[in-house]
């Protein structure tokens, strides 16, 4: 896909949005580049109010538990992972024990959390049974806790290392207590960008496959975009279009946008010719142009302080 702005006037596109018409990916590209923030925000608010009770805003209390920062993958934006090549950089590698994970789950519940988000590096010693066991650990510690865990990369690797079909593996994860998958590992769903950002990670098609399989067996998931590195509005619009295509068959629980935290990463020390700065208007636009369907609106957030 080589997306170009549609060339339609912003007012016409926003008129279609207000009418509940489906806009094209090219139209989304135009909005991301040209739309006045206030007009875009007003249209987004109208859609939100049409799809949801305007007097109600929902949230949940969640604790992130990152069980390890040891990772064999080589995402150039990642300042979190540790591996043999980066030992002693950015602090020490760690791997939480089951007891530590259970303690964090109980502590979160005591503070009012109803959900834990479980994600971490792809440790060379892990196979898929590690994630099953972590899920059981959480449910044993606090049976009512919603387990939102394991990226599309983690479950793909987990199943692959066991030699198990993804669907059968996801069914076992669900039986262990997994309720939903985070949409992370999506980064930018454009393989031209992924080749630079995360060359050994799953492809756009593989990410989409995991989400479709997960929903097919009754799991839920969220969707994310991580943007503002070597990508631009064309890639954001393409990313949103991939999510929207999947969304035709199922419903993501939320959509969140964030900027990468590249401190200490390969990217932070390598000046790329296409480096660009994402300004706050672009960040706001990406938060305001999420794909929507049905009666549940996406929540849009940005990791940047706007
Ligand atoms: S972002 Fe990439 S390198 Fe960092 S922990 Fe995840 S898979 Fe590993």
Image: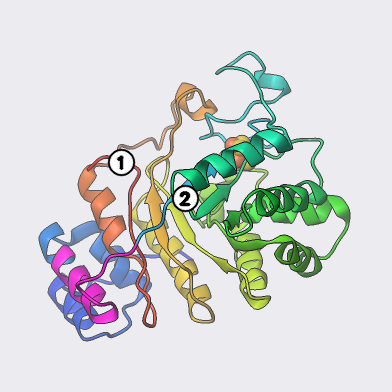
SS under mark 2:
loop
Is residue 53 highlighted in magenta?
yes
Nearer to me, 91 or 245: 91
Quarter of the image with the C terminus is: top left
Provide residue 264's location: percent of width, then percent of height. Answer: 50, 22
Q: Which residues are magenta?
A: 41-58
Q: Residue at x 65, y 41 (%)?
A: 102
Q: Would you place residue 42 above or below residue 186 in this image?
A: below
Nearer to me, 145 or 119: 145
Provide residue 256's location: percent of width, then percent of height. Answer: 40, 56
Q: Would you place residue 20 above or below residue 246 in this image?
A: below
Viewer can see residue 67: no
In the image: residue 228, left or right of residue 123: left
- Distance, label 2 to label 1, CA atoms, is 23 Å
Residue at numbered disc 1: 304
Q: Residue at x 44, y 54 (%)?
A: 225
SS under mark 1:
loop
> Which secondary structure dominates the residues rendered in magenta?
helix
Viewer can see residue 95: yes
Q: Is mark 2 within 8 Å of ligand 1?
A: no
Is residue 228 highlighted in magenta?
no
Q: Is mark 1 within 8 Å of ligand 1?
A: no
In the image: residue 138, left or right of residue 250: right
Q: Residue at x 65, y 77 (%)?
A: 216
Q: Would you place residue 292 above or below residue 225 in this image?
A: below
Q: Residue at x 86, y 61 (%)?
A: 164
Q: Is disc 1 surrounded by few (<14), some (14 to 19) or many (20+) residues within 10 Å? A: few
Callout 2 touching callout 1 (CB < 8 Å): no
Residue at numbered disc 2: 113
- Give the mark, 2 or 1, whose residue is nearer the N terminus: 2
């Amino acid at each position: 896909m080589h997306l170009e702005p549609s060339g339609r006037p912003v007012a016409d596109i926003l008129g279609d949005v207000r009418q509940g018409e489906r806009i094209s990916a090219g139209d989304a590209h135009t909005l991301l580049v040209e739309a006045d923030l206030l007009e875009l925000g007003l249209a987004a608010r109208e859609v939100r109010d049409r799809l949801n009770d305007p007097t109600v805003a929902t949230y949940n209390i969640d604790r992130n538990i990152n069980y390890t920062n040891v990772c064999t993958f080589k995402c150039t934006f990642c300042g979190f992972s540790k591996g043999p090549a980066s030992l002693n950089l950015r602090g020490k590698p760690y791997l939480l024990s089951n007891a530590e994970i259970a303690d964090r789950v109980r502590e979160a519940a005591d503070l009012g959390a109803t959900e834990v988000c479980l994600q971490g590096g792809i440790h060379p010693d892990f196979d898929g049974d590690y994630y099953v066991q972590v899920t059981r650990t959480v449910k044993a510690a606090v049976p009512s806790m919603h387990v939102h865990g394991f990226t599309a990369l983690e479950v793909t690797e987990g199943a692959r290392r066991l030699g198990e079909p993804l669907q059968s593996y996801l069914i076992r994860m669900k039986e262990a207590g997994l309720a939903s998958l985070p949409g992370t590992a999506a980064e930018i769903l454009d393989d031209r960008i992924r080749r630079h950002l995360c060359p050994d990670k799953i492809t756009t098609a593989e990410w989409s496959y995991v989400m479709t399989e997960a929903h097919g067996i009754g799991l839920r998931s969220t969707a994310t975009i991580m943007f503002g590195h070597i990508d631009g509005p064309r890639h954001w619009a393409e990313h949103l279009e991939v999510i929207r295509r999947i969304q035709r068959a199922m419903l993501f629980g939320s959509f969140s946008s964030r900027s990468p935290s590249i401190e200490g990463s390969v990217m932070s020390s390598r000046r790329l010719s296409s480096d660009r700065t994402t300004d706050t208007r672009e960040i706001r636009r990406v938060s305001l142009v999420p794909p929507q369907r049905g009666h549940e609106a996406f929540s849009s957030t940005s990791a940047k302080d706007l």
